[in-house]
Amino acid sequence: MSKLLKLVLGLVLVGYFCVLVVKRTPATLVTANLVKVLPHVQLAAITGTAWKGRAGAAHLNIEGQVIDLGSISWKFRPLSLLALKACVDVESDVLNGNVCRTVGGVNQLKNLQVELPASLANRSLRDAKIAGVGSLIIAEGAFNDAGEVSSLQGNFTWKGARLNFQGMWFTLGDFAADLSAAGNGAVQANVFDLAGPYGVKLNGEFGIATAPKVKGEVLPREDASDDIRDALGLFAVPQDSGAFAVSYPIGS
C-alpha cells in the first residue's frame, strides 16, 4: 500500500472519528464557546448536539438593556478541525454568519451580518435619542477574550439616521464606516456619508483598552438644520469651506 493511500485512509478514519465524537457531544459545549465569540449574548432553551443544535431563546444584554434575538440555530463545520479550530454556522432573525474558536483561544468571525435598530443605543445617551437601522457586516475578524482585535475587515451602515434633541427630531441622513484593525487591539473606523444634508469624513479609533479618538470634518449642506449647525459650532471649529473640523479629544 502506497504512503499516499495510507495517508488518505488515515485522514478519513480521523475525520470519521471526529464526526462521531462531535455528533455525540452535548450542545452546551457549542453554546459555552458561542458566548465567548459573541460577547453579551445569552442563550437558553438549548436542544440538539454540538453538530447541529438550537437555542430557543437568545438575548443580547448591553448595559442592562435586554434585546430579544429570537432563536439561534447552528451547524458544525467538521473540516474546521483540520485547521485546529471549531467552527459553526449560526443563523437567527438578526444575526447570521460563521464563528470559530481556535485551540489557542482566538475568536474568529467570518461573513457575519447583524442588523438592529439604532434606538438600542438610547440607554447610553443622556439628553438625546437616535433612530434608524444599524447594520454590521464583518467579512473577517479575530479577537481574544479580552476584546483586543488582531484583524478586522468589515463595514457598518446607519440608514435613516435621525436625532431627537429637546423634543425635536432632526434628519441626519445615511452613513457608513469601513472597519479595520488599528494594530493596537483597537478598531479603526473611516466614517463617510451616503446621503442626506451632512457631508461627513471622519477617522475614528476605539477599543476596550483604548480611549476613543475622532478626527475629520462635517459639512452641513443647504438643506441642513440651522440648529444642528449651531450645535456643531459648540465643539467643532468652523472652516472657510463651510465645514466644521471635528477633533476628539478636543485639541488632539
Image (tube, rainbow, N blue to C red):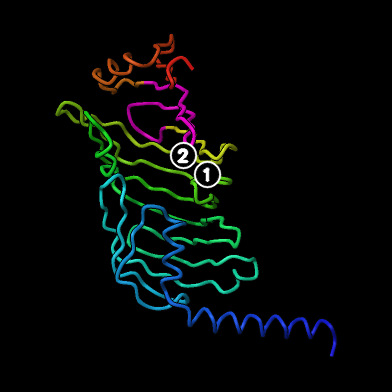
Vertical placement of residue 168 versus 139, above or below: above
- Residue nearest the viewer, comparing 165 with 39: 39
Q: Nearer the viewer, residue 14 or 225?
A: 14
Percent coordinates x, y for residue 191 in the rendering? 45, 33
Where 155 falls versus 195 (above or below)?
Answer: below
Circle 2 is placed at which residue position?
A: 208
Residue 72 picture location, percent across and down:
35, 66
The crowding category of the residue bearing disc 2, from other C-alpha atoms within 10 Å (few below 14, some 14 to 19, many at least 20), is few
Percent of width and height locating residue 22: 52, 78
Q: Are marks 2 and 1 in contact (CB under 8 Å)?
A: yes
Q: Kindly identify the residue that appears in the image at 46 percent across and 60 percent down.
A: 97
Secondary structure at numbered mark 2: loop
Earlier-in-chain disc, 2 versus 1: 1
**With 218 as the anchor, is 123 left or right in this view?**
left
- Please name the residue shown 34% across and 21% down the image: 221
Residue drawn at (54%, 61%) of the image: 101
Q: Farthest residue toward the left?
A: 167
Q: Which of the 4 image quarters holds residue 71?
A: bottom left
The amino acid at mark 2 is Ile
Magenta: main secondary structure: strand
**Left or right relative to 185: residue 84:** right
- Give the x, y percent position of residue 64: 26, 47
Which stretch appears magenta?
A: 193-219
